[in-house]
Image (spheres, rainbow, N blue to C red):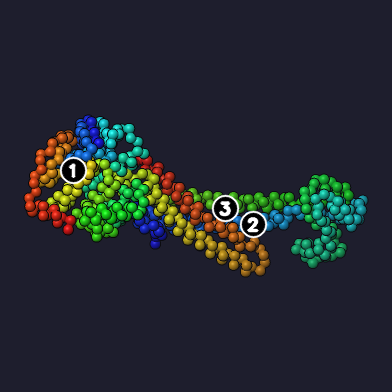
């Protein structure tokens, strides 16, 4: 699915923010991406969702060498990647439904199907009553769910999320991670960048850990069982 | 006040751009000027056509008095000229004008004295051709049969008229081309500004898999909508102006001006002005967006 070999990334003439990054993500895997602030998590995600090209090294995505991919080929590859941006990146002048509909409209999906699918997924994330609400009228957690709905509406092969729990409380954060895990179980490759250790410990997945621009792949450490009050919080998180 | 695009939803909030606020009104002004230029060119063409068709096929033979010259009397030479004309292939009719008719023709220059029988008036023959006429051969035969006879086929006058009409048409075309160039520059400016303002949104759309054509279509819809509405307003203003000029020209007692009424097909041509502006805006927006996006990752 994804293979990085000795990848480095620098912005302009600055020092490399990522150095000698090498790892392979198998299809249908789930990884956390961890590291301190400034360790390069967002930069690594940007390489994965093709916002940047590496300064050096080899990046292979969906079996294609990114060095050989032309600008014309990028849209098709990007449509196979769902991204949840740290700041949600919702378009303020569009409704929740129109925001979620963007990937489908780009893919040329018939309008009737667009409305039906987007309404369904927004109901699935608990926003059935906010289909036509503008992002400015939604809470942080609601915006986050719109962003997630948009990232998965076209069933991406790869789902990347940059600090998806950074703007929500732990209860909603847990619920979001359960959503990602459901997608992972459906076969989507998932990478979640987060520094929330408490949440990470509750899921049994390996992690890619960045430290000062260098990457270590850490195995899963086993799931920490939820306490009863956390479970109750999760159940009511969407309410 | 800004003209708002009709389409309510667009991935890019172009309708609220300061750069596009006046695009519709600028387009209205351009459509107004282009429609007036085209209408003027068509009216001049019509006028030249009417003069042309009025004179084409018409010939005038003048038999001048030649006092003291050893030639036949004036009336005999006029009759001889008539005989030559009526026997010439391509001549439909040849009519000798009476003295009264000639006096009326000369009255603007000579006043009432034109009818003075003491004035040595020439004889005039009005000739209508119904086919090709050998003008050079006819001149020779007239000169031989009726000394002092000259043949005027209005070629110089018609050439000047056609040249004038052509110049007017060219000038109008130049105005339309200049308006088109101004429209292109306006759209390029508005689109580039829009791209600069909404660069983060465009980058986001790209990251979600939007093609450059998808992005350019957003701009195309926006400028076409504004151009059609602005062009429609400009055309309405031009139509009102044309109607006003037509009414004003009808009030003139002397027919100094040509008829300023347009034919139905000419109105159809004017109706194409907003459509042409919209097409130009569409092509310009597409070209500008695609060229600009090529530099983006």
Q: What residue is rendered at 23% in x and 49% in y?
A: A148
Residue A112 visible, this orientation? yes
| Between B43 and A129, the one nearer to me in the picture | A129
Q: What residue is rendered at 27% in x and 34% in y?
A: A60
For marks 3 and 2, give the one nearer the viewer.
Answer: 2
Q: Quadrant of the C terminus of chain A?
A: bottom left
**In what element is the residue under mark 3?**
helix
Q: Which residue is mark 3?
A: B172
Looking at the image, do the residues carrying marks 2 and 1 touch, with CB atoms under 8 Å apart? no
**In what element is the residue under mark 2?**
helix
For marks 2 and 1, give the one nearer the viewer.
Answer: 1
- Mark 3: few/some/many CA within 10 Å (<14, 14-19, 20+): many
Vertical order, B232 against A20 (above or below): below
Q: Which residue is mark 1?
A: A193
- Mark 2: few/some/many CA within 10 Å (<14, 14-19, 20+): some
Q: What residue is rendered at 17% in x and 34% in y?
A: A214
Q: Which residue is mark 2?
A: B46
- Mark 1: few/some/many CA within 10 Å (<14, 14-19, 20+): many
- Percent x, y for residue B114? 81, 64
């Amino acid at each position: 699915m994804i293979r990085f070999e000795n990848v480095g990334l620098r912005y302009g003439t600055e020092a490399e923010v990522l150095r000698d990054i090498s790892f392979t993500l198998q299809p249908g895997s789930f990884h956390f991406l961890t590291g301190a602030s400034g360790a390069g998590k967002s930069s690594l995600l940007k390489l994965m969702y093709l916002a940047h090209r590496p300064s050096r090294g080899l990046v292979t995505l969906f079996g294609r060498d990114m060095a050989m991919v032309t600008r014309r080929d990028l849209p098709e590859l990007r449509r196979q990647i769902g991204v949840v941006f740290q700041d949600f990146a919702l378009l303020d002048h569009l409704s929740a439904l129109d925001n979620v509909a963007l990937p489908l409209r780009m893919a040329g999906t018939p309008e009737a199907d667009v409305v039906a699918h987007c309404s369904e997924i927004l109901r699935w994330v608990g926003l059935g009553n906010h289909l036509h609400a503008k992002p400015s009228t939604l809470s942080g957690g609601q915006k986050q769910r719109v962003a997630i709905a948009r990232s998965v509406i076209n069933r991406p092969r790869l789902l990347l999320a940059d600090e998806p729990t950074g703007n929500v409380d732990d209860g909603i954060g847990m619920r979001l991670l359960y959503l990602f895990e459901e997608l992972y179980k459906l076969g989507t490759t998932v990478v979640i960048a987060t520094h929330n250790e408490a949440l990470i410990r509750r899921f049994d997945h390996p992690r890619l850990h960045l430290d000062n621009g260098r990457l270590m792949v850490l195995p899963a450490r086993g799931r920490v069982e939820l306490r009863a009050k956390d479970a109750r919080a999760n159940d009511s998180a969407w309410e | 006040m800004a003209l708002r695009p009709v389409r309510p939803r667009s991935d890019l909030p172009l309708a609220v751009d300061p750069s596009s606020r006046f695009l519709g009104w600028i387009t209205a002004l351009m459509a107004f000027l282009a429609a007036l230029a085209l209408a003027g060119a068509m009216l001049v063409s019509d006028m030249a056509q009417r003069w042309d068709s009025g004179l084409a096929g018409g010939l005038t033979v003048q038999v001048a008095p030649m006092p003291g010259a050893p030639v036949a009397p004036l009336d005999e030479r006029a009759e001889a000229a008539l005989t030559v004309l009526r026997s010439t292939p391509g001549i439909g009719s040849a009519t000798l004008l009476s003295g009264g008719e000639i006096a009326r023709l000369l009255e603007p220059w000579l006043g009432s004295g034109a009818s003075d029988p003491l004035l040595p008036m020439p004889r005039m023959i009005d000739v209508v051709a119904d086919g090709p006429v050998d003008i050079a051969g006819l001149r020779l035969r007239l000169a031989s049969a009726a000394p002092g006879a000259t043949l005027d086929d209005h070629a110089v006058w018609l050439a000047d008229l056609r040249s004038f009409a052509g110049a007017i048409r060219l000038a109008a075309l130049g105005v339309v081309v200049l308006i088109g160039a101004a429209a292109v520059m306006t759209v390029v400016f508005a689109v580039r500004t829009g791209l600069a303002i909404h660069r983060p949104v465009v980058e986001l759309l790209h990251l979600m898999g939007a093609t450059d054509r998808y992005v350019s279509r957003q701009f195309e819809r926006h400028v076409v909508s504004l151009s059609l509405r602005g062009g429609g307003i400009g055309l309405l203003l031009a139509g009102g102006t044309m109607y006003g000029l037509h009414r004003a020209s009808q009030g003139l007692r002397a027919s100094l001006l040509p008829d300023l009424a347009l034919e139905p097909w000419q109105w159809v041509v004017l109706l194409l002005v907003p459509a042409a502006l919209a097409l130009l805006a569409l092509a310009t927006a597409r070209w500008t967006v695609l060229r600009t996006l090529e530099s983006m990752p």
